[in-house]
Amino acid sequence: MDEKRLKGIMGLCVRAGQGVFGEDGCRKAIATEQSRLLLLDEGASENTRKRYESLCAATEARLAMLPEGLLQEATGRPGAAMAVKEGNFANQVIGCL
């Protein structure tokens, strides 16, 4: 995983409005297929992890675990998860993983 490049792409993704935060926002983005990629912080609680894993399994969305703190460091937003909307940014993030 190229963390430096990943952080840069995630930051651009947020500035471009292609990142969705919050449990409700992430669930909605994945359920409506606006997003097929969910980035989850390794520091997330076990319950949060299980909820997102089952959601991604049901919708065939990709779930990627990030090292603890990387999500907040890259985006400047606290939280455990970020859904990346379909498109070029999602493809670039997947390429970094």
Image (cartoon, helix red, strand yellow):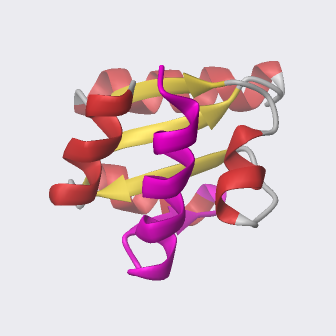
Residue at 27% from the left image edge and 49% from the top image edge: 90
User: Residue farthest to the left?
Assistant: 87
Residue 6 in the magenta stretch? The answer is yes
Q: Is residue 64 above or below residue 71?
A: above
Out of 60 and 77, give the one closest to the viewer. Answer: 77
Out of 5 and 55, give the one closest to the viewer. Answer: 5
Q: Dominant secondary structure of the magenta stretch? A: helix
Residue at 46% from the left image edge and 42% from the top image edge: 5
Horizontal arrangement in the rendering, residue 59 relative to residue 30 (left or right): left
- Is residue 44 visible to us here? yes
Indicate the quadrant containing the C terminus: top left, top right, bottom left or bottom right: top left
Residue 76 in the magenta stretch? The answer is no
- Is residue 27 visible to us here? no
Q: Is residue 71 above or below residue 26?
A: above
User: Residue farthest to the bottom?
Assistant: 16
Q: Is residue 53 above or below residue 85?
A: above
Q: For residue 86, what is the image quadrant?
A: bottom left
Q: Position of residue 18 (x, y in %)?
A: 37, 70
Q: Is residue 82 above or below residue 62?
A: below
Horizontal arrangement in the rendering, residue 12 relative to residue 85 (left or right): right
Horizontal arrangement in the rendering, residue 67 relative to residue 26 (left or right): right
User: Residue farthest to the front?
Assistant: 4
Q: Position of residue 42 (x, y in %)?
A: 73, 23
Out of 67 and 55, give the one closest to the viewer. Answer: 67
Labels in figure, total: 0
Residue at 75% from the left image edge and 66% from the top image edge: 76
Horizontal arrangement in the rendering, residue 56 relative to residue 68 (left or right): left
Q: Position of residue 79 (x, y in %)?
A: 77, 53
Q: Position of residue 72 (x, y in %)?
A: 76, 53
Highlighted range, magenta:
1-23
Out of 92 and 5, give the one closest to the viewer. Answer: 5
Residue at 63% from the left image edge and 55% from the top image edge: 23
